[in-house]
Every structure is written in structure tokens, then in C-alpha cells.
Image: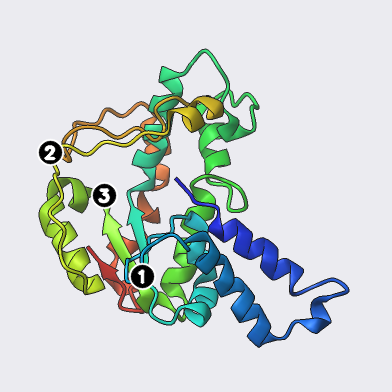
Amino acid sequence: MSGPVAGMVTALQMSASSGEYARFVDNSARARLLRGVFEAYYAEVSAGRVIFDTNRSWTGRLPLLAELFPDCRVICCVRQLGWIINSIETLLNRNALQLTRLFEVKPMLSSYSRAEYLMNPKKGLIGLAWGTLREAWFGAEAKRLIIVAYDSLVSKPLETMQKLYAELEEPYYAHDFDDVSYEESGFDTGMGLVGMHKVGGKVAAAQRTLVIPPDLFARYAEFSFWQKPELNRGGVLVL
């Protein structure tokens, strides 16, 4: 689930950068105001605790994060795009009696049109996140990224998480990979896509069935740029 902080930061940044009062706000004040959003939102978190703020848009704001929090890192969970589209189609099949807000409650009459909408670089659930991640990957702040590959996480959860903790220089927490559960039933029901955020059971590689046309799956086979060492010019850590 994406938290609200990124949206709050964007709204405040717009207010402090344009309009009749913007001339009263210099960069020092902007930095204090924007950091203040994080400090106010997480005021109840004990000092010294690590905060994970979840929002897919942060990869498009790495220079800003670097300015506000010089030691910050951005963890990005990735998976082959064809399987992500396939997972969404599987969910749609399970919720066939209603239209989902994922497509602005508009009928998308084929998996091809739905995939095209999902991959829209401006507002698509996948396309926007993929585009900003690619921007961060090739950008000046690429060193802040930590990429966690889906296949690595589900096949070697302990090893993958231990490497992640080591990179963050945090003491390892003993997770129970045999019992991981999470759901946001209220949100998912409102989206018309029940089960969208539901996770349960053991972390393990599951048998996957392809429910989208093979040519549609193949269309996005080359989109996994994080799997190509020759494109990793910024030395991004891929787990």
C-alpha cells in the first residue's frame, strides 16, 4: 500500500514554488517545510527507529530525497512485467461481476487494451512505476536504489533478506517466512478488486498459470532492464 506522505510533499512543494506567496519562501525554508511533513507524520515513531515510507513515486523524486535525507535508500521490489500483468488479469477473472476503479471504472474489452492502460507512463499502475524506476536507475542518484527481485525473494527469502539488512547496516530481524499475512480488504473492495493486496501463508515460489495471450506476455519480455548487467552503469545493488 502506498502511504500519503509523497502526495503531501508534492502538494506542499507546489504551494511553496508557485503562486503569490512563493517569493517569501527560499530554498532553506522549503527544505525545512518538506522535512517537516515527514517529521510531523512520523512524530509518534520512537527515536532511532527505521522508517519505511511506501510509495511508488519516490523513484521519480530521488534528487529531492537526497537533498532532504542524504543517507536515505530506496528499496524497489521488481518482477517481470508480463507476470505482473498476468497477476492482475487473474484478479480480474476472480472479480468478473464488477468493473474495477483500476481502469477508472471503464470497460476494457480485452487483455491487450487493459495491458496498454496499465503501462501508460502517466497514470498506469505499472507504466508510471516502471518509468520512474528506470529514470532512477539511469540517474545521478542510482546508488541509493536497492532492487529486490521477486524470484529471489520467493525462492531464497532468508538469504535475500539477510543481504538487505546487511546493505542497510541494520541488525537482522528473524522473520517467520512460513507465516506472512497482510490484507487491505476495505481498500480492495472499494477498488472492485478483492484480494489485490492479500498475502498469506508461506513465502515460496508458486506454480503460475499464464492467463494472458503468449504474445502479450512476450511483448514485455525485454522490459526487465535490471536483469542486464551491461545497463547497470550506476552500480545498483540487485538482490
| Circle nearer the N terminus (2, 1) | 1
Which residue occupies 60% across, 80% down?
A: 31
- Please rate how many residues cluster around mark 2, counting C-alpha atoms within 10 Å: few if below 14, some from 14 to 19, many from 20: few
Location of the N terminus (image quadrant): top left
| Circle nearer the N terminus (3, 2) | 3
Where does label 3 land, which residue?
Answer: 150
Identity, as a three-letter code, of the amino acid under mark 2:
Asp
Q: Secondary structure at mark 3?
A: helix
Location of the C terminus (image quadrant): bottom left
**Does the CB distance between marks 3 and 2 fall below 8 Å?**
no
Give the foreground label among 2 and 1.
1
Which residue occupies 43% across, 28% down?
A: 185
Q: Which mark is residue 178?
A: 2
Q: Secondary structure at mark 2?
A: loop
| Circle nearer the N terminus (3, 1) | 1
Where does label 1 land, which residue?
Answer: 47
Identity, as a three-letter code, of the amino acid under mark 3:
Tyr
Which residue occupies 37% across, 54% down?
A: 222
- 7 over 205 or under it: above or below: below
Give the foreground label among 3 and 1.
1
Q: Secondary structure at mark 1?
A: loop
Give the side of residue 158 with respect to residue 23, left or right: left
Q: Position of residue 180 (x, y in %)?
A: 22, 39
